[in-house]
Image: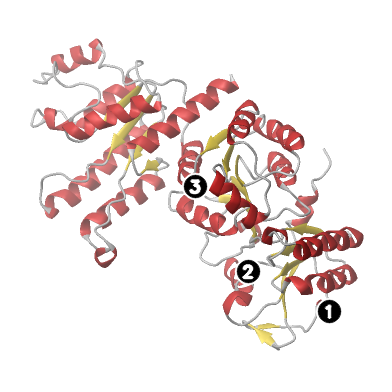
């Protein structure tokens, strides 16, 4: 298989940031490269400054003494054509156009300028990422578009038409244990487009899961072909932005996207073997599920709830998601009776821990029995947030519960999902002990490779979509 053109682009030995400055947006692309530890040469370019963030700055691309592989453009739209001529002189391979205000404005003159830029780039042999985008986050190479992103590489690849959405998604997903192979924010897709990124990720050995946020496609037939090919090799999850009338208008002004019928889109994605996500939160749930869970072979779920009402709602939400909340099997009841558990004929699925009371048999004991039982395909447990006890009792109790969940995980090959709420008393009380206890629980579970979800509804929906995916793959 020939090497994809993006492979060479994504391994630059030198990067120039044209329009760099010591502060503000102009420093936004230099700072992340320094923070991420990019090992190649970094060349800030701006005639107004002799030095930027401790690096020698150059008046012009042509003044840089060595070769330049990759350019980040933070100059105004009107300056891009001249910059591309300099790129041609320096033998630049690719330009990331952070620069915006082109066809997404809906105005004729910026759209014409955009086409002139494409013509100039093709004449010069320069590939374009963008315009109107954040560009590349590639932690293994030390490349990033903002600071404070994880430096550890992972196996999740994201191609996205939204830049701010990409940053938001990296943050919410990384807090749940996800790490990325590469993230590419590509905006208007003037040159390299969604098909190029999809084809690349399908071939990329560093990427095991492909995520996409798309507002529109250039060539529907080609995209379907690329999507079907990618989905045949690894899971693909897609958000379609601009599903409603107002969303379509917003998409057109955001990335100049030509949006299509939502129904046709969802049918096409499903037929290609990919998965539709409604929003970034659901995409994060699916990324967590694919990253941490083994294949889900069935829908029969064992649920460890908290109190009575919580257990009832848990059962409802699992059933609404399409999971099968099966009754407690007779052999488990018989085992409970043999062990002398007084509520053997009362406790059920979901497990209402309040029923167990002081029987000497805990919810964890029940969960371990259900994990061993062939009548259950997956397990869902909830960290009990509101036990009627004092702080001094709750904190060690939650820690013991987390240790028990880790033990359950270690003792079963079945998919095991845990619910940890996102309760916060408010910004002024962000150091409240209840909030800290839940944060600690979440961190410890993720470190043990246990997927964590904020609600049972989201966990159940994600589990159902995973099971459907693996069912289609058979």
10 Å neighbourhood of mark 2: few (<14), some, or many (≥20)? many
Nearer to me, 184 or 272: 272
10 Å neighbourhood of mark 1: few (<14), some, or many (≥20)? few
Nearer to me, 260 or 79: 260
Q: Tell whether 227 sits left or right of 425.
A: right
Residue 34: image location, x then y, percent: 61, 72
CA–CA distance between discs 1 and 3?
43 Å
Q: Tell whether 453 sits left or right of 223.
A: left
Q: Tell whether 384 sits left or right of 267.
A: left
Could you tell me if the residues under marks 2 and 3 are in contact, i.e. CB atoms within 8 Å? Answer: no
User: Residue at the spot x=51%, y=65% of the render?
Assistant: 148
The secondary structure type at the circle numbered 1 is loop
Could you tell me if the residues under marks 1 and 2 are in contact, i.e. CB atoms within 8 Å? Answer: no
10 Å neighbourhood of mark 3: few (<14), some, or many (≥20)? some
The secondary structure type at the circle numbered 3 is helix
Q: Earlier in the sequence, mark 2 or mark 3?
A: 2
Q: Quadrant of the C terminus?
A: top right
Is residue 364 visible in the rendered image? The answer is no
User: Residue at the spot x=54%, y=49% of the render?
Assistant: 246
Where residue 94 is drawn, which disc sits there?
A: none
Residue 435 falls in which quadrant of the image? bottom left
Q: Earlier in the sequence, mark 1 or mark 2?
A: 2
* Residue at which label 1 appears: 65
User: Residue at the spot x=13%, y=49% of the render?
Assistant: 393
Q: Quadrant of the N terminus?
A: top right
Nearer to me, 399 or 318: 318
* Residue at which label 2 appears: 33
Is residue 284 visible in the rendered image? The answer is yes
Residue 470 falls in which quadrant of the image? top right
Where residue 280 is drawn, which disc sits there?
A: 3
Residue 413: image location, x then y, percent: 42, 27
């Amino acid at each position: 298989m020939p090497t994809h053109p993006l492979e060479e682009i994504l391994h630059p030995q030198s990067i120039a940031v044209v329009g760099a400055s010591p502060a503000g947006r102009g420093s936004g692309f230099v700072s992340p490269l320094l923070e991420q530890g990019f090992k190649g040469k970094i060349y800030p370019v701006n005639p107004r400054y002799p030095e930027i963030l401790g690096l020698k700055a150059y008046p012009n691309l042509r003044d840089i003494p060595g070769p330049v592989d990759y350019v980040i453009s933070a100059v105004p739209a009107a300056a891009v054509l001249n910059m591309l001529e300099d790129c041609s002189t320096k033998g630049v391979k690719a330009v990331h156009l952070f620069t915006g205000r082109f066809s997404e404005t809906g105005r004729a003159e910026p759209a014409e300028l955009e086409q002139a830029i494409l013509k100039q780039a093709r004449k010069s042999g320069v590939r374009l990422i963008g315009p109107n985008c954040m560009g590349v986050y590639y932690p293994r190479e030390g490349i990033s578009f903002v600071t404070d992103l994880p430096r550890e590489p992972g196996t999740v690849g994201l191609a996205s038409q939204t830049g701010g959405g990409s940053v938001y998604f990296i943050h919410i997903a990384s807090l749940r244990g996800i790490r990325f192979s590469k993230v590419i924010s590509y905006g208007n897709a003037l040159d390299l487009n969604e098909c190029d990124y999809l084809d690349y990720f399908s071939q990329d050995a560093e990427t095991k899961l492909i995520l996409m946020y798309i507002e529109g496609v250039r060539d529907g037939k080609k995209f379907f072909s690329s999507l079907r090919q990618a989905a045949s090799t690894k899971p693909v999850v897609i958000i379609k932005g601009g599903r409603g009338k107002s969303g379509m208008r917003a998409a057109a002004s955001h990335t100049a996207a030509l949006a299509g019928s939502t129904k046709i889109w969802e049918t096409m994605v499903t037929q290609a073997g990919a998965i539709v996500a409604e929003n970034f939160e659901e995409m994060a749930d699916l990324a967590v599920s694919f990253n941490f869970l083994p294949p889900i072979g069935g829908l029969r779920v064992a649920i460890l709830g908290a109190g009575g009402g919580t257990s009832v709602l848990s059962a409802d939400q699992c059933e609404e998601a399409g999971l099968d909340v099966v009754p407690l099997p007779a052999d488990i009841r018989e085992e409970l009776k043999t062990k002398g558990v007084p509520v053997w004929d009362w406790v059920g699925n979901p497990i209402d821990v309040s029923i167990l009371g002081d029987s000497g048999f805990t919810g964890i004991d029940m969960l371990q029995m259900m994990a061993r039982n062939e009548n259950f395909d997956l397990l869902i447990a909830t960290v009990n947030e509101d036990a009627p006890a004092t702080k001094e009792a709750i904190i060690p109790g939650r820690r013991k519960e987390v240790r028990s969940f880790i033990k359950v995980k270690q003792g079963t090959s079945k998919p095991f999902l845990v619910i940890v709420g996102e309760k916060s008393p408010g910004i002024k009380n962000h150091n409240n002990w209840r909030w800290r206890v839940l944060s600690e629980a979440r961190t410890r579970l993720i470190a043990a490779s246990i997927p964590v979800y904020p609600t049972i509804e989201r966990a159940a929906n994600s589990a159902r979509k995973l099971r459907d995916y693996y069912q289609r793959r058979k």
